[in-house]
Amino acid sequence: MTNTPFDLSGQVAVITGSSRGIGRASAELLAQLGAKVVISSRKAEPCQEVADGIRKAGGDAHVIPCNISRRDEVKALIDGSIAHYGGIDILVCNAAVNPYYGPLLDITDEAFDKIMGSNVKSNLWLCALAIPQMAARGKGSVIIVSSIGGLRGSTVIGAYGISKAADFALCRSLAGEWGPQGVRVNCVAPGLIKTDFARALWEDEERLKRRCATTPLRRIGEPHEIAGAVAYLASDASTFMTGQTIVVDGGVTTASA
């Protein structure tokens, strides 16, 4: 991949929630493009499996478990990544939670706070710890994996959608604050992707049938189809892009029926 804007050789990428789904696919692609990747999720064992696979393919991967809802663990992730690799060039804020499925007005305070804390506050923590050292070198890229749930209403995952809309605002504000120092901040907003995280949505056959019928590509997405957008935003192919959101949803948000 040398001599292309997608070459990530020598760069270090930290990807949260990278033991499976979109995070794993992103980590594997960034490693394939030459990045040294830090694999992170709550449990070490599945992270190690991903890291071993990357190493077997000739890549460089390091494991640091982290529960993103705990500030001390987020700090340990960033500090540990810098200690191991010497710095962070790419931060992918992918980990998220959705402990509630149902009418928005029935959600408990505990569930709402968990969603906002893990999906928004943790991203702020990660950025606060990683961006300054990027700015000190005059370059860096932050990618927040949001969702089209932040663009649309929902009768079953409304609080999750609120958190993802907040991520759009977080991205825009950080882009304005850190752009002068060379740090770019962008979002990717996936549609329905076949991951364990979204299983409740795509395992419901009737719901899946309706979604596919109103999606121009007539199907839901796969994790690797989001990883490509993450790689673009991480690379020099997107050096004039910041504060933006790439929607990758098979066209569902463009369809009238």
Image (tube, helix red, strand yellow):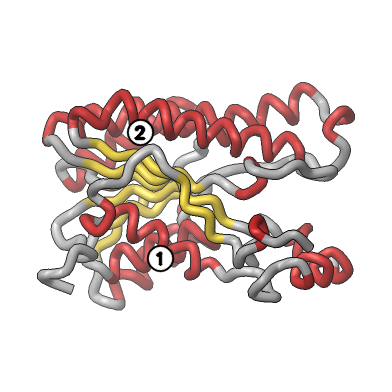
Crowding at mark 1 (Cα within 10 Å: few <14, some 14-19, many 20+): some
Q: Nearer the viewer, residue 238 or 38?
A: 238
In the picture provided, is 57 more to the left or to the right than 165?
left
Q: Which three-letter amino acid code belongs to the residue tagged 1?
A: Gly
Q: Is residue 69 above or below residue 255?
A: above
Q: In this rendering, does residue 196 appear at all?
A: no
Mark 1 residue element: helix
Q: Residue visible at 32% across and 28% down?
A: 129
In the picture provided, is 129 more to the left or to the right than 160?
left
Q: Nearer the viewer, residue 159 or 42?
A: 159
Q: Residue visible at 31% across and 46% down?
A: 241
Q: Residue visible at 41% across and 60% down?
A: 229
Q: Nearer the viewer, residue 249 or 193?
A: 249
Percent coordinates x, y for residue 81 in the rendering: 27, 42
Residue underneath mark 2: 76
Residue underneath mark 1: 228
Crowding at mark 2 (Cα within 10 Å: few <14, some 14-19, many 20+): some
Q: In this rendering, does residue 208 appear at all?
A: yes
Who comes first in sequence, dot 2 or dot 1? 2
Real-space CA distance between mark 2 and mark 1, rounded to the nearest whole angstrom: 28 Å
Quadrant where the N terminus is found in the figure? bottom left
In the picture provided, is 230 more to the left or to the right than 166?
left
